[in-house]
Image (tube, helix red, strand yellow):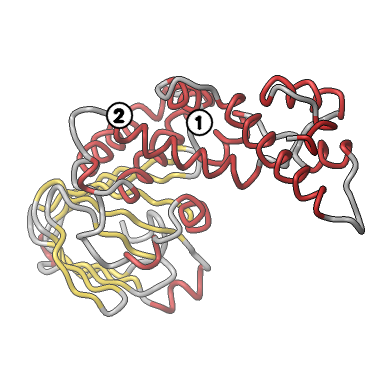
Amino acid sequence: MSDVYYPIDVVARAPSSFSGIIESTQIGAVGITRFAADAQRALRRKVHGGRDDSDFFALVMPTMQTERFSHLGRLGDVAPGQVAIFNSAEEYRTDIPDGTRNVTIKIPADLFRAMCPKIDAVCGRVDVANSRFVPLLTQFALQALESAACLSIEHVNSLERGLLELAFLMMDVPESYAGDDSKPVIDHFFHRVMAYIAANFQDPDLAPERAAQSHRVSIRYIHKIFQAHDTTFGRELRLARLRHAQKLLRENLQNKSRQMTIAEVAYNCGFSSQALFSVRFKEAFGYSPRDEKSH
C-alpha cells in the first residue's frame, strides 16, 4: 500500500489487526486512488523525494473521516468535501483515523504548474479550493477509476482532459463564482483563452487545436465557450492580429529611420501572406493598410 504512487512510510496504530483496501489506476498522466483503511500515520520523507525523484501534486479528498496533516510547516485538518494538496518532492505527514476513506488524484507537477501557477503557494492548505468543485472532482475520479479497464485510448484522453480541467477549475475559480449555472465558469475560462490568444496571436499556426492542447481541454469545449459569447476562436484571433497590425502601421508613420513594409507587418502579426492580410484588414477597418496614414 505504501508504494502505489511513490515511497511512503506507513505506521499502523494497531499493527496486529490492521486492514485496508486500495485501488488505483492511471488515466493518461493522471493517477487515481481509492483508499479505505484503519488508523495509521503515513509519512513521505524528504529522503524519499531525493531517492525516487518524484515531482507530483497529490490532491487528497476524504470521503469519510477527517484526516490531520503536516506539510511545509503547516498543520491542518481536511474533512470530507475538502481537498488537501501535497507536493511529493517535499515531506508531509497524514494521520488517519479508523474508518477513513479518501480519493487521491496525482498530477505531474510540471503539468499542474503550467495550468495553475499558484499551486506551490497553496500546498498544505485546505481553504484555497472552490468547495463546490471538490465533490464533482471526487465523483468524476471514482467513475474514471471504475471505468478505466474498458476504455479506449480516445476515451482515456478525454477523461484525462476532464480530470485536469476540473482540478484546474477547483483551484482557479473563486468561490463566489460557483453556482448552479455554469455560465460563470464558462466566462472565466473564456477570459483565460482570450489571454492566451493575446499572448500567442503572432504564431501563424495558432488554432483552436493548439489552445485546447495547451489548456488540456477538448476542442469542442473551446468552441463552446466562444459560442457562449457569440463569437468564434478564429474571429477573436483575427481581430487580435488586425488590431496589432493597425498599431504597427500607425507607429510606422512616426518612425522615419526604419519603416516596416506591409509584408513585414503581415508576417509579424501571424498572417500567412500579405494578400490575405490586406483583404482582412480592409474587411475590418474599411480601408487598406496602405491608406493607414490618411486615417
Residue type marked 1: Asn
Q: Which mark is residue 85?
A: none
The residue under label 2 is 183
Q: Is residue 99 above or below residue 133?
A: below
Q: Residue at x 16, y 59 (%)?
A: 78
Q: Nearer the viewer, residue 180 or 108?
A: 180
Q: Residue at x 79, y 28 (%)?
A: 277
Residue type marked 2: Lys
Give how far apart the Cα atoms at labels 2 and 1 are.
Answer: 25 Å
Quadrant of the drawing holding the N terminus: bottom left
In the drawing, does residue 177 fall left or right of residue 161? left
Q: Nearer the viewer, residue 272 or 224?
A: 272
Q: Nearer the viewer, residue 241 or 84?
A: 241
In the drawing, does residue 123 fall left or right of residue 231? left
Q: Residue at x 24, y 65 (%)?
A: 125
Q: Which mark is residue 157?
A: 1
Q: Position of residue 132 (x, y in %)?
A: 19, 41
Q: Position of residue 273 (x, y in %)?
A: 86, 28
Q: Is residue 101 above or below residue 263?
A: below
Q: Position of residue 203 (x, y in %)?
A: 73, 40
Q: Position of residue 110 (x, y in %)?
A: 52, 57
In the drawing, does residue 266 fall left or right of residue 122? right
Q: Nearer the viewer, mark 2 or mark 1?
A: 2
Label 2 or label 1, whichever comes before in sequence order: 1
Q: Nearer the viewer, residue 156 or 198?
A: 198
